[in-house]
Image (cartoon, rainbow, N blue to C red):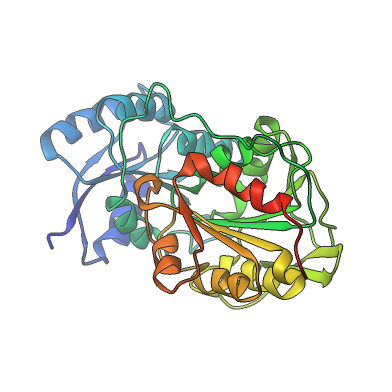
Amino acid sequence: MRPRRVVIVDDSPTMRALIRAALDRHPGLEVVGEAGDPLQAREAIRALAPDVLTLDVEMPNMNGLEFLDRLMRLRPMPVVMVSTLTQRGADATLAALELGAVDCVGKPTSTQPGAFDALAAIVAAAAEARVSARPAAPPAVERPAAYRPGDRVVAIGASTGGVEALMTVLGAFPADCPPTVVTQHMPAAFTGGFAARLDRACAPRVVEAQDGQALRPGWVHIAPGGARHMQVRGAGSNLTIHLSEGDLVSGHRPSVDVLFGSLAEAAGARAIGLLMTGMGRDGAEGLMAIRSAGGATFGQDEATCVVFGMPRVAAEIGAVQTQLPLHRLAPAVLAAAARKGTA
């Protein structure tokens, strides 16, 4: 298979050189062009027909978000945001992911010099992503006819394409939703802002998880990005969040496998697992643990995934009981949550 063609868009020549150096080490990628602003990027896309774009946010002549919005409407293609690890940069990157960017990477800093270690793998995966023009009216999210809180606990895992998918699912959750924990693969600087954006858009209370927090109805906890895994510990109705250091699991920290596995052990048949869009296999074994414990398991279908990696592996090993398109996941999970668990 031919290498995937990449155009780098950043106003800093130094940053373009760093990005190129990281991408040149990947045999499946070929950097075919660079651009210092969106106007140059537009011409490069026309002339070079790249498979994937890396894009900065703050650039001269046109804001990166404005350019991305036009690009996704007129010539949709996979885009990876390469952003500064500041609050402003994180907020802009999250907005870009909502506009249709596939993934995000923070720029290297003195405190995080290895920020580009995974850049090539992320860009290579993004090049294979399913990207289409944003519909004027996306499918309406189905809602259950009636939802009554039960004794179940929900865990959700997502990666590439997960920001928009989580917005859709959690946006359909009611204010008294079951206790919910989420691991979304994302740089550490971005998860706090992501939780805040979800909190403003959704009926439940959405927060970045803290060690020792109790799980209770109406609350959604987002795993902090970076150096710690998120687990659920306890028994019965006394479940709490535990954040711990540790090695990468399934290539990630925090890992969906770690979260799912801990919920299977703590909640047994009261656990509900949902694995959504993302590259790799993180979450598949953990989802199997939930199913083996008697819990309910769901996977996002291929047609609505940006990258059908994680849920595909889970389906292949028999971990997924029910596979559904994105707009049908929330009502199915809520219906399962309304049924009493047996653990």
Left or right: 85 in relation to 149: left
- On the image, the x and y values in percent for residue 321 come to 51, 63
Q: Is residue 219 visible?
A: yes
The percent position of residue 194, horizontal first and vertical second, equals 62, 42
Q: How many marks do you count on the picture?
A: 0
The quadrant of the image that shows the C terminus is bottom right
Residue shown at 44% from the left, 32% from the top: 99
Evaluate whether residue 244 shows in this view. Answer: no
Which one is in front, 170 or 142? 142
Question: Looking at the picture, does residue 343 appear above or below residue 209?
Answer: below
* Above-or-below relation of 142 to 118: above
Horizontally, is 207 left or right of 227 in the view? right
Choose top left, top right, bottom left or bottom right for residue 40.
top left
Tell me the quadrant of the picture where the N terminus can be found: bottom left
How far from the left and from the top, in percent, is residue 281? Answer: 44, 68
Residue drawn at 18 percent across, 29 percent down: 43
**From the viewer's perspective, is 3 left or right of 205?**
left
Is 117 left, or right, of 20 in this rendering? right
Residue 20, percent from left and from top = 28, 54
**Which residue occupies 58% across, 47% down?**
332
